[in-house]
Amino acid sequence: MNARVAKEEIALLIPTTLASYAGRDFAAAEPPAPNALLRAISWLLDLPRRRAVIAELSALSDHELADIGLSRHDLPRVFDPAFAAQRSGHRSQTARSALSF
């Protein structure tokens, strides 16, 4: 069964005025910080380099990735700062345990 909805009926369902957003206070909304805009532009400018690195890492075999301490499921998170912090914490912990005898 295929129920068709007329264009006029859909138009009635879609809010087209600001009155539909009456619960939201537009004056209280803060404009984005200039730093956020600069970070977004920087992220866009850095995108080709990140894609090239991901493509290069994807071309490595699983054994080669394991040699540098990565696995295939880690590749999308390589540029995530939280992932980098976790990896550096893991490396320093491993180095400490190797030095203590």
Image (tube, rainbow, N blue to C red):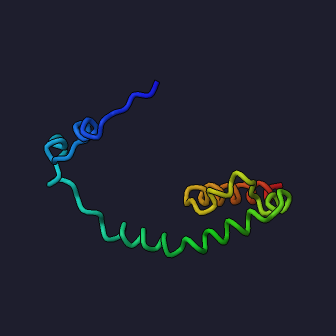
Query: Quick check: 66 left or right of 51?
Result: right
Which residue corresponds to the image point at 65% horizontal and 60% vertical from the top-left?
Answer: 88
Residue that extends furthest to the right in the rendered view of this protein: 63
Quarter of the picture holding the C terminus? bottom right
Q: Quadrant of residue 79?
A: bottom right
Q: Is residue 7 above or below residue 63?
A: above
Q: Position of residue 86 (x, y in %)?
A: 62, 54
Question: Disc count in the image?
Answer: 0
- Nearer to the camera, 44 or 11: 11
Q: Is residue 9 above or below residue 76?
A: above
Q: Position of residue 61 (x, y in %)?
A: 83, 60
Residue that extends furthest to the top in the rendered view of this protein: 1
- Nearer to the camera, 70 or 10: 10
Q: Position of residue 15 (x, y in %)?
A: 22, 42
Q: Position of residue 65 (x, y in %)?
A: 79, 60
Query: Quick check: 62 left or right of 87?
Result: right
Which residue corresponds to the image point at 29% horizontal and 63% vertical from the top-left?
Answer: 32
Which residue corresponds to the image point at 62% horizontal and 68% vertical from the top-left?
Answer: 51
Query: Quick check: 68 left or right of 48?
Result: right
- Nearer to the camera, 27 or 66: 27
Which residue corresponds to the image point at 46% horizontal and 74% vertical from the top-left?
Answer: 42
